[in-house]
Structure formats: C-alpha cells, structure tokens
Image (cartoon, rainbow, N blue to C red):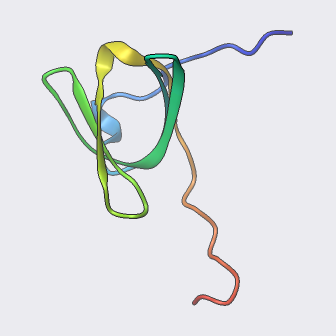
Amino acid sequence: MAARLVIAITSQDIGARITTRRRVPGGFRDVVGVLVSWADGVLEVRKKDGTVVEIPEETLVAAKVVPAAPPRPGRM
C-alpha cells in the first residue's frame, strides 16, 4: 500500500509543533518545528535550533501536527 501525503494543518495551528514535507529542486525537504506564522501564502516554522524556515504554501506536499519532542536523557 502506498503512503498518502496529506496537508493536515491550518493557520489555526500557529503555536503547535508540526512536521512538513515540501518540494525543492531535486526532491523534497522536511522541517520539524513550531509554526510561528502563516500569512500571504508563506509558513514560518521555528526549528529547535532557533532558525526560522520560510515555506511557500504551494510547495507543501504533506504536513501535520506532532507531539512535543520527548525530553533528552540527562536533561531536566
């Protein structure tokens, strides 16, 4: 059975942790982070390292809300 790619996020998910897959020249690229804005056809996702990735809406092929990252061992 083939995987089904679905965009299951909306602008109502701002502030949620999401995962995305988008088309880029030569293939696809994934980003996981917090959706910080979605305006004028561009999503902004803040990755855990603090960088913000701008994703043109028309390049999205899949996206969904995901749970918070589990705590890393030894860090509390």
Q: Quadrant of residue 12?
A: top left
Q: Residue furthest left?
A: 40
Residue nearest the viewer, comparing 8 with 25: 25
Figure disc tally: 0
Q: Residue at x 74, y 15 (%)?
A: 3
Task: Locate the N terminus by quadrant.
Answer: top right
In this view, 22 is above or below 43? above
Is residue 51 left or right of 70 when viewed as pictured? left
- Screen quadrant of the C terminus: bottom right
Q: Residue at x 64, y 67 (%)?
A: 70
User: Along the line of sight, which residue is nearer the eye, 66 or 31?
Assistant: 31
Q: Is residue 47 above or below residue 10?
A: below
Q: Is residue 13 above or below residue 21?
A: below
Q: Position of residue 18 (x, y in %)?
A: 47, 43
Residue 35: where, in percent of width, then height? Answer: 33, 44
At x 32%, y 12%, the residue is: 58
**Vertical position of residue 43 compared to residue 17: above or below:** above
Q: Residue furthest top?
A: 1
Asked if one can make out residue 69 in the rendered structure from this viewpoint, the answer is: yes
Instruction: Residue at 38% x, 16% y: name it.
Output: 59
Residue farthest toward the front in the current orientation of the protein: 26
In the rendered view, does 40 fall on the left or right side of 28?
left
Residue 17 visible in image? no
